[in-house]
Image: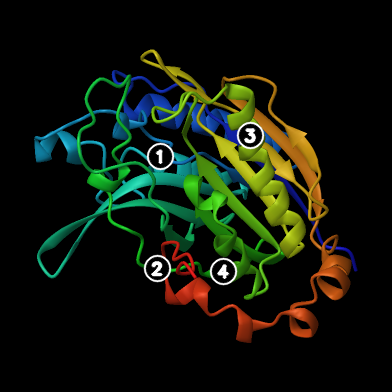
């Protein structure tokens, strides 16, 4: 029997510094209703969906930094989103900045959660591949301080049985690393959902926007095909207080084809009816892991991080 799941990539337009959580949650709920009206059962919101992309700003006051973080989920600001999801019977993925405490020590993560149609959290992921830098770089248009404000995620790449299939999560820069998807594929993932906030400008290199968008799509399309899985990517887009984030929210089939994509840089709901069995033939023939993977030759992937060229003869 074919397993069908209609999903939505719920792209967010800009969130400015002056915009509060309540305003953002109202926008999320509006998109939740729009997705439900089209028959979707899962909605994918972006990374850090409740605030502006604050890692672009250099901050030193811990209280100022922590104001962008959530100490509980749900909380009074986000409870209306959970309540709306439960009333509609629709699930969602939500990215946010998480502040927790372990053994008396505060810990900061770039986090996402998977929420079912009853409004219950069924999975949590913490971003592993943190981009950017931890120090202040002078004379650039903005900073990219994820390594300053977040710790490396400590939950690995788990998957969950939900929405009629096996689901995985990742966040933004994780999508550029093939290991992200392969680890989840080895656990049977049939769909990976992710949110991202990607600047339109590369502060380290004069890279044209069309090339940045090409690379964004390329990594998700390759991952979908090489693992026989659906990939749903949802962006924060547009200019936040003058700082551009590109959109490009899309849904990618296990064949590597983009089957639906955003057309704007504002709030936009992109939907597609996904056959969770579509990738079976890919996983049974072309990328049959059990038949063709040769892990005895892959040791370097986990034994070293940086490049070590051969010595000169």
Determine whether 307 is above or below 98 in the image.
below
Q: Between marks 3 and 4, how big is the CA–CA gap?
A: 22 Å
Q: Residues within 10 Å of mark 2 (few under 14, many from 20)?
A: few
Q: Nearer the viewer, residue 178 or 38?
A: 178
Q: Residue furthest front?
A: 313
Discs 2, 1 touching: Cβ within 8 Å:
no
Q: Are marks 2 and 3 in contact (CB under 8 Å)?
A: no
Image location of residue 55, percent across then percent down: 30, 35
Q: CA distance from mark 2 to mark 4?
A: 11 Å
Which residue carries the number 3 mark? 249
Q: Is residue 50 left or right of residue 33?
A: left
Residue 218 position in % (x across, y down): 68, 43
What element does badge 3 sit on?
Answer: loop
Q: What residue is shown at x 31% (from left), y 24% (from top)?
A: 142
What residue sits right under mark 2 in the picture?
155
Q: Residues within 10 Å of mark 4 (few under 14, many from 20)?
A: many
Separation of marks 2 and 3 at Cα, in angstroms: 26 Å
Q: Earlier in the sequence, mark 4 or mark 1?
A: 1
Left or right, 200 with reference to 292: left
Which label was assigned to residue 179? Answer: none
- Callout 1 environment at 10 Å: few (<14), some (14 to 19), or many (20+)? many
Considering the numbered disc 1 on the image, is that residue within a helix, a strand or a loop? loop
* Residue 134 position (above or below residue 187): above
Along the line of sight, the residue nearer the viewer: 309 or 217: 309
Residue located at (68% from left, 27% from top) = 262
Q: Which residue is mark 1?
A: 48
Disc 2 secondary structure class: loop
| Residue 304 rendering spot, x and y as whole percentages | 42, 71
User: Between residues 221 and 14, which one lies in front from this camera angle?
Assistant: 221
């Amino acid at each position: 029997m074919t397993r069908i799941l209609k999903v939505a990539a719920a792209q967010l337009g800009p969130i400015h510094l002056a915009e509060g959580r309540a305003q953002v949650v109202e926008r999320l709920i509006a998109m939740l209703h729009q997705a439900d009206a089209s028959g979707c059962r899962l909605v994918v919101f972006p990374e850090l969906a409740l605030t502006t992309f604050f890692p672009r700003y250099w901050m030193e006051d811990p209280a100022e930094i922590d104001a962008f973080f959530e100490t509980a989920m749900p909380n009074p600001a986000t409870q209306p989103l959970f309540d709306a999801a439960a009333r509609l019977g629709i699930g969602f993925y939500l990215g946010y900045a998480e502040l927790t405490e372990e053994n008396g020590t505060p810990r900061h993560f770039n986090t996402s959660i998977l929420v079912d149609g009853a409004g219950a959290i069924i999975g949590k992921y913490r971003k592993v591949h943190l981009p950017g830098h931890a120090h202040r770089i002078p004379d650039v248009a903005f900073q990219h301080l994820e390594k300053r404000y977040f710790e490396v995620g400590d939950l690995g790449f788990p998957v969950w049985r939900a929405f009629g299939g096996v689901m995985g999560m990742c966040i933004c820069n994780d999508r550029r690393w093939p290991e992200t998807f392969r680890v989840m594929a080895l656990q049977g993932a049939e769909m990976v959902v992710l949110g991202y906030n990607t600047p339109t400008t590369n502060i380290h290199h004069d890279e044209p926007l069309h090339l940045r968008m090409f690379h964004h799509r390329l990594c998700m399309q390759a991952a979908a095909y090489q693992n026989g899985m659906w990939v749903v990517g949802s962006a924060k887009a547009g200019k936040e207080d003058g700082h551009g984030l590109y959109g490009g929210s899309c849904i990618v089939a296990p064949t590597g084809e983009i089957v639906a994509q955003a057309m704007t840089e504002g709030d936009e709901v992109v939907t597609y009816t996904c056959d969770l069995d579509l990738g079976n033939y890919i996983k049974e023939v072309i990328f049959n892991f059990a038949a063709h993977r040769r892990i005895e030759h892959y040791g370097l992937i986990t034994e070293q991080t940086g490049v070590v060229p051969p010595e000169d003869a």
